[in-house]
Image (tube, rainbow, N blue to C red):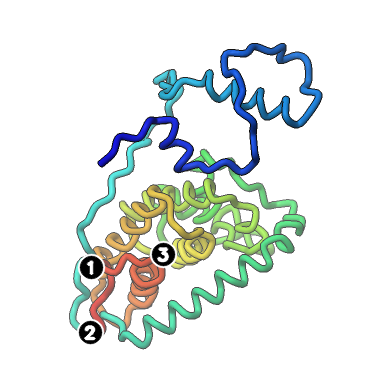
Amino acid sequence: MAWIPAESAVEELMPRLLPVEPCDLTESFDPSVPPSTPQEYLRRVQIEAAQCPDVVVAQIDPKKLKRKQSVNVSLSGCQPAPEGYSPTLQWQQQQVAQFSSIRQSVIRHRSHWKSKQLDSNVTMPKSEDEEGWKKFCLGERLCAEGAVGPATSEGPGIDYVQIGFPPLLSIVSRMNQATVTSVLEYLSNWFGERDFTPELGRWLYALLACLEKPLLPEAHSLIRQLARRCSEVRLLVDSKDDERVPALNLLICLVSRYFDQRDLADEPS
């Protein structure tokens, strides 16, 4: 193979889009004086490019790096469903089709719902406020240690502070991808130590519906973690008629079949 000079290799990979006359790359110019012609502007670009080093090393201050930046992707699969718990392939395909339709609807109407004013009692936490988001989504009562029994309210109406705000389109449409990923992580962490609840299921479904493809590495790891946790909780459910079973099956189905994590998919019953 013939040796190709570095300059020729660059030109081969990056063909010129404009005809530029050769110029003296050692020529100097006053950067405070604007170029008077297009040709002079292009010459300055050539000279500046020639002065750039081939390799640049970034000076990073370790103190400014965020904690927990490492992303660990586990390749382990889900726990197999107990006998009679696994959904049929037709059911899984129907759920994926419906989920895809919902995602398209969210995308089409995001601007409309984002422009709607939130109720006066709705204050969305900041993206980095983990405890705030847990309470916002699940309610202070559910997040409190040892909370059991039905919710009670002394006053009229619904106390969303206690029971959590539902994932309304007017709320999730205001969440950018960084916030969606962060809240998904917060709720997955909460779920990792507790049982599945309807409030949690609604928010997990909504966040998955807002998660953009292709997935970022952080999101990829989170949804796999979520599917595995769902399979673990399903093993602990005593009856296949328990209302948690279809909800857990649904989340596993979406992660595995919509987000292409096929090794996590349930074998059809």
- Mark 3: which secondary structure? loop
- Compare residues 33 and 238 and report the one nearer the observer: 33
Residue 246 location, x and y as percent? Answer: 37, 77
> Residue at the spot x=67%, y=29% of the render?
42
> What type is the residue that disc 1 sits on?
Leu
Q: Mark yes or no: residue 244 visible.
A: no
Q: Report how far apart the C-alphas of labels 1 and 3 lie in the structure.
A: 14 Å
- Compare residues 216 and 115 and report the one nearer the observer: 216
Q: Report how far apart the C-alphas of labels 1 and 2 lie in the structure.
A: 14 Å
- Compare residues 25 and 150 and report the one nearer the observer: 25
> What type is the residue that disc 2 sits on?
Gly
Q: Is residue 242 left or right of residue 198?
A: left
- Mark 2: which secondary structure? loop
Q: Mark yes or no: residue 266 visible.
A: yes
Residue 14, placed above or below residue 27: below
> What type is the residue that disc 3 sits on?
Thr
Quarter of the C terminus within the rendering:
bottom left
> Residue at the spot x=39%, y=30% of the render?
6
Q: Residue furthest right?
A: 36
Q: Nearer the viewer, mark 3 or mark 2?
A: 2
Mark sitting earlier along the chain (1/2): 2
Residue 204, placed above or below residue 17: below
Q: Give yes or no for contact between labels 1 and 3 (Cβ–Cβ under 8 Å).
A: no
- Mark 1: which secondary structure? helix
The mark found on residue 236 in the picture is: 1
Q: Which residue is mark 3?
A: 197
Q: Which residue is mark 2?
A: 84
Mark sitting earlier along the chain (1/3): 3
> Residue at the spot x=50%, y=41% of the render?
14
Quarter of the N terminus within the rendering:
top left
Residue 173 location, x and y as percent? Answer: 64, 58
